[in-house]
Image: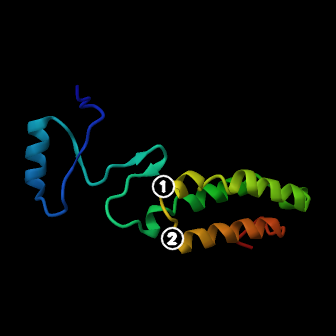
Amino acid sequence: MINFHKSIIVFSTNTPTAQKQMVADLMNIPWSNSLGKYLGCSTLQGRPRVTNFTYLIPRTLNKLEGWKAHCFSKAGRTILIQSHLESLPAHTMQCFTLPHKISSTLDTLARDFFWKNSNPNS
């Protein structure tokens, strides 16, 4: 049995809106431009772009906000980086290759935290 509450129809970009609505009404399934997320990863259609992975940067910054770099030794900062910051994009990286811009930004944030620059804006 099809669960229509969990179903979405995704059309080609060339399909007119009127046809999308007609088919969706006929099948009683909503239509969308994207498939959304599955297990925390975006379900991409087409080539992955930098904008698909920018959510990782605010998540990393949110983790860093709660930590005070000057309160930890270098060993403590290393453990925090390895156990928390490097685990945030791990699941995404199992599914997709991260764009260089995103991975270098994440590396920069971790490096700045390690060298006691916990506020990247200063």
* Left-right relation of 14 to 101: left
> Can residue 94 be seen in this snapshot?
yes
> Which amino acid type is marked by label 2?
Pro
Identify the residue under disc 2: 99
Which x, y percent locates residue 37?
Answer: 41, 47
Amino acid type shown at disc 1: Cys
Residue at horizontal 26 percent and vertical 54 percent from the top: 33
* Of residues 14 and 17, the one drawn nearer to the viewer in this rendering: 14
In the picture shown, does residue 7 fall above or below 67?
above
Q: How is the image coloured?
A: rainbow
The residue drawn where x is 66% and y is 59% is: 61
Q: In the rendered picture of this protein, how many numbered marks are placed on residues?
A: 2
Position of 69 compared to 27: left or right? right
Quadrant housing residue 93: bottom right
In the figure, is residue 53 to the left or right of 113?
left
The label on residue 95 is: 1
Residue appearing at x 8%, y 52% in the figure: 19
Q: Quick check: 46 above or below 26?
A: below
Q: Position of residue 108 (x, y in %)?
A: 69, 72
* Callout 2 secondary element: loop
Q: In the orientation shown, which residue stands out farthest toward the front?
A: 94
| Quarter of the image that includes the C terminus | bottom right
> In the figure, 51 relative to 38: above or below?
below
| Label 1 Cα neighbours within 10 Å, binned few <14 / some 14-19 / many ≥20 | few
**Residue 5 appears at what percent x and percent y?**
28, 31
Are circles 2 and 1 on residues that touch, CB within 8 Å? no
Mark 2 or mark 1, which is nearer to you?
1
